Amino acid sequence: QVQLVESGGGLVQPGGSLRLSCAASGSIFSIIVMGWHRQAPGKQREYVAVMPSGGRIAYADSVSGRFTVSRDNAKNTTSLEMNSLKPEDTAVYYCYAVIRVVGGMVGTYWGQGTQVTVST
């Protein structure tokens, strides 16, 4: 069993910053990919950032230059530093991970989501 737990959402004014964190726990053998998606009201879930193990980090065009994703492999955590936030960044943010569990199976796991609201 694998769990991803997120924290750090909230209300922030335009131009402000927030940091989201996500911790994976359970029967983890290795984490292949960690990343973030978001879903705004009335819209489909969209990709935000991805950080493959040993691979190149990639960002959606809409957040490139403003958001920074990082990983702590020893702690099985990922963080999303969000700067210069805009009202259009308002969404529920989900972390995800592609994980090889003990026993060899590979699966994609999602956090429960954390609300980010950018508003005056």
Image: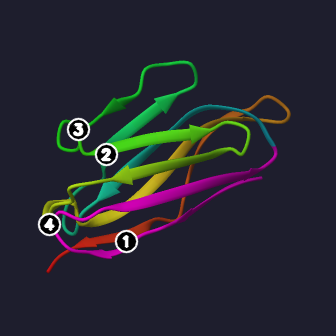
Under circle 4, the secondary element is helix
Residue at which label 4 appears: 87
Neighbourhood count class around disc 1 (C-alpha, 10 Å): few under 14, some 14–19, many 20 upward: some
Q: Which one is nearer the viewer's eye here, 21 or 5?
A: 21
**Residue 108: quadrant of the picture:** top right
Residue interval drawn in magenta = 1-27
In the rendered view of the protein, which quadrant contains the C terminus? bottom left
**Residue 4: quadrant of the picture:** bottom right
Is residue 9 shown in magenta? yes
Separation of marks 4 and 1 at Cα, in angstroms: 13 Å
Q: First in sequence: mark 3 or mark 1?
A: 3
Separation of marks 1 and 2 at Cα, in angstroms: 16 Å
Checking the image for residue 115, the label placed there is: 1
Mark 2 is on which residue type? Phe
Under circle 1, the secondary element is strand
Mark 1 or 2: the one toward you: 2
Residue at which label 3 appears: 65
Separation of marks 3 and 1 at Cα, in angstroms: 21 Å
Separation of marks 4 and 2 at Cα, in angstroms: 15 Å
Residue at which label 2 appears: 67
Q: First in sequence: mark 4 or mark 1?
A: 4
User: Residue 9 in the image: x percent, y percent?
Assistant: 41, 70
Q: Which residue is painted at 31% across and 45% down in the image? A: 67
Q: Is residue 104 above or below residue 13?
A: above
Q: Main secondary structure of the magenta part?
A: strand
